[in-house]
Amino acid sequence: MRPAVATALQDHRLAAVDALRGFALFGIVVVNIAYLASGYRMAGLAEPAFSAPLDWEVRWVVTVFFENKFYLLFSFLFGYSFTLQIDSAAASGSAFVPRFLRRLTGLFLLGIAHAVLLFPGDILATYAVVGLVLLAVRRITPRTAMLCAGALTLALAAGFVLMACLALRGLDVSGTVAGGAAQAARSDAALQSSASMIISDHLHKLGRIVVLRVLFQGPAVLAACLVGLAIGKRRLLADPERRPATLRRIQWVGFPVGLAGAVFYAHSTWSGGTSAYHMLGQAVDLVTAPLLAAAYVATLLRVLPHAPRLAAALVPPGRMALTNYLGQSLICSLIFTGYGFALVDRLSPLTVSSIAVAIFALQAAGSRVWLRGHRYGPVEWLLRWFTNWRRPAVRLRARST
């Protein structure tokens, strides 16, 4: 195959992955902004200043359609991209393991800085740790990877069912991963204050979040990464338009089951029920959220070939996913904390969600302009330098022919 043709086919395959990554970024900012805008949401509570019917409707929409779906999609793409990096190293004849370990180190350092300075709910450090597991099992077969992902998910769900049973018997452990209203009020005061107070509050929250990562999100991220690894090994995203029947089956199963589970999870979150009921909702969501995320992926893969404008909007931010992910936290911190306007818990859920949409639209437009003259986003360029131990080209005109 001629190099130009091979490059064109590779670009076509990566465009679908980048579009999915851009779509995931949109969902992530819609979810994360609520936690950046309110100390109460980080404590697992609704903002007491906003209790109108519209406020609750917005919370329900975000919980049903967004929460716990898009970080799974992002994690799936992390596992899928892992296979692309292996292929790239093999094609270039370079050693994969040292380069990938440097990449994980860079991700971990970025994640720690992100968690301390901007958002304690950072996911990059988790990816760095999960990446070590992927590296260790990189020769796993697709079938085994899928079986391990399923076993992890079911084990996590069983764990939450067990905690629900313990809560019914008076052994409530929900306080391990969430604070109360008093803690939320203290967090609000700190976030509106100086930089040192903001950082101190983030460090305080990290202790609880580490427990949450170990008990819930870390294993769920690993399961999604293993699915991405299996899909990548089978090259199933190389030509998704050739598998319409498979995509339709994913939609037929994923939407009804995933949405039913999401509604149950939202009700367990916002109905004011017991801790046991909320944990049962978590267990149901663990099993059904991946199905809804898969249905989103299948739908987007079916739509993209017929919607070039949608693809053109999603691909650029997807190519700069790391820059945009960190940029989302920076923008939100400037809006809601003492770094900037200190509007924490002063804006309604609808306003907060509208800001999230505006942030993504701004990033999509900005990414498109940036990539007209640059090969990588700023943070991607920095991570690539750290990964390869050499300064990468910046401008498009520097690309070799």
Image (cartoon, rainbow, N blue to C red):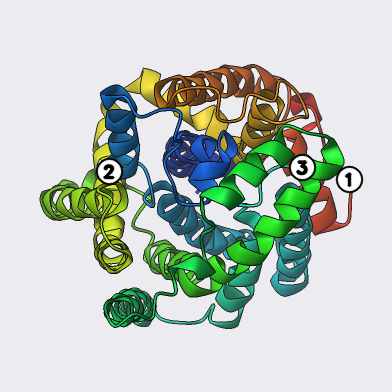
Kindly identify the amino acid type of the residue bearing the numbered disc 3. Ile
Query: How many C-alpha atoms fall within 10 Å of the one at disc 3: few (<14), some, or many (≥20)?
Result: many
Q: Are marks 3 and 2 in contact (CB under 8 Å)?
A: no
Q: Secondary structure at mark 1?
A: loop
* First of labels 3, 2 by sequence position: 2
Q: Residue at x 34, y 35 (%)?
A: 59
Frontmost residue, 2 versus 107: 107
- Find residue 208 and report its horizontal and vertical position in percent: 60, 64
The residue that mark 1 highlights is: 391
Frontmost residue, 307 versus 253: 253
Distance in Å between CA atoms under marks 1 and 2: 44 Å
Q: Residue furthest right?
A: 390
Dot label at residue 198 = 3
User: Mark 1, mark 3: which one is toward the viewer?
Assistant: 3
- Find residue 394 and report its horizontal and vertical position in percent: 81, 32
Residue 2 visible in image:
no
Q: Is residue 87 left or right of residue 240?
A: right
Q: Residue at x 42, y 64 (%)?
A: 224
Kindly identify the amino acid type of the residue bearing the numbered disc 1. Arg
Frontmost residue, 45 versus 377: 45
* First of labels 1, 2 by sequence position: 2
Q: Is residue 313 left or right of residue 156?
A: right
Quarter of the figure with the C terminus: top right
- Find residue 392 and report its horizontal and vertical position in percent: 83, 43
The residue that mark 2 highlights is: 64
Q: Is residue 105 left or right of residue 282?
A: right
Task: Classify residue 146 by image quadrant.
Answer: bottom left
Q: Residue at x 48, y 42 (%)?
A: 21
Q: Residue at x 71, y 58 (%)?
A: 204
